[in-house]
Image: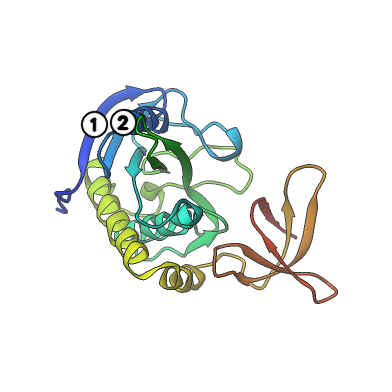
């Protein structure tokens, strides 16, 4: 069984409102980098764009406090870093699955969502910047009625897995890709992410801040992680944020 790396300071809890909220507070108080809050259940789990993240027992919920040496302007790149870590984790236990990475930070398995990632930044009491990376990974349960459909690890394999097995695999993968990013930059992260990019080359619609909607062909990823959208007139536009749907 994979063990938890020594650099990790793991705080394991039964129930919290939100692992991201607790990690954010710990970060403000000066918690060490790679302090990870893990809970068996969240009562108020958070997703992107203020959405709720359903958090039943049996799924995995963690939030890591990071203090990257790369400047804050590059911290958004970590959504791609952690997406790769989640993809590797799923691939290790469900190796026959088709894993796709949906911009900016969703992980899909067989075209269904299996994970969510949330980044939040803050400044501690010493005015030093820190980042909280939250990960929710479906292991035993998948929510019904989601926009793109959802799945979980135990739907993909014959022998059921568990948090005890998945947690150290995920943490090890997070450290691996984080170190690649911190030591070598975003270029390799981008290259590996594009290998698994979901819907690359397809027509998409991007819903941004209302009423702005953009449509075109998804043709790549910029050097800083923005989506490259090629419009019908051939013009390329770099998109920083939004919700992607395929048309």
In the image, 149 versus 192, the foreground residue is: 192
Quadrant (top left/top right/bottom left/bottom right) for the C terminus: bottom right
Vertical order, 51 against 159 (above or below): above
* Disc 2: CA contacts within 10 A as few (<14), some (14-19) or many (>=20): many
- Front residue (pair 238, 110): 238
Looking at the image, which residue sits at the far right?
Answer: 233
Quick check: marks 2 and 1 in contact, CB under 8 Å?
A: yes
Q: Please identify the quarter of the rendering in which residue 197 is found.
A: bottom right
Front residue (pair 181, 167): 181
- Characterize the local packing of mark 1: few (<14), some (14-19) or many (20 or more) Cα atoms within 10 angstroms: few
Image position of 104 with respect to 59: above or below: below
- Which residue does the image show at 61% across and 49% down from the upper left? 148
The disc placed on residue 39 is: 2
**Mark identifier at residue 12:** 1
Can you give x and y, in whole percent of width and height, for residue 34 in the image?
27, 44
Query: 247 left or right of 191?
Result: right
């Amino acid at each position: 069984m994979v063990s938890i790396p020594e650099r990790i300071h793991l705080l394991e809890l039964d129930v919290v409102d939100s692992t991201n909220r607790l990690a954010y507070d710990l970060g403000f108080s000066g918690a060490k980098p790679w302090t990870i809050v893990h809970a068996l259940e969240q009562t108020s789990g958070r997703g992107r764009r203020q959405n709720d993240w359903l958090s039943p027992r049996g799924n995995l919920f963690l939030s890591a406090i990071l203090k990257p040496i790369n400047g804050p302007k590059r911290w958004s790149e970590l959504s791609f870093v952690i997406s790769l870590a989640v993809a590797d984790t799923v691939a290790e236990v469900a190796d026959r699955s088709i894993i796709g990475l949906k911009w900016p930070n969703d992980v899909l398995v067989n075209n269904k969502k299996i994970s969510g990632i949330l980044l939040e930044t803050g400044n501690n009491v010493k005015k030093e910047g820190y980042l909280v990376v939250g990960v929710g990974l479906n292991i035993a349960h998948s929510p019904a009625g989601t926009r793109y459909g959802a799945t979980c690890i135990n739907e993909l394999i014959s022998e059921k897995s568990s948090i005890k097995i998945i947690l150290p695999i995920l943490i090890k993968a997070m450290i691996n890709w984080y170190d690649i990013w911190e030591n070598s930059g975003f270029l390799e992260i981008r290259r590996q992410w594009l290998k698994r990019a979901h819907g690359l080359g397809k027509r998409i619609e991007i819903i941004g801040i209302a009423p702005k909607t953009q449509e075109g062909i998804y043709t790549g990823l910029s050097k800083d992680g923005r989506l490259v959208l090629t419009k019908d007139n051939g013009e390329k536009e770099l998109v920083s944020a939004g919700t992607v749907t395929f048309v």
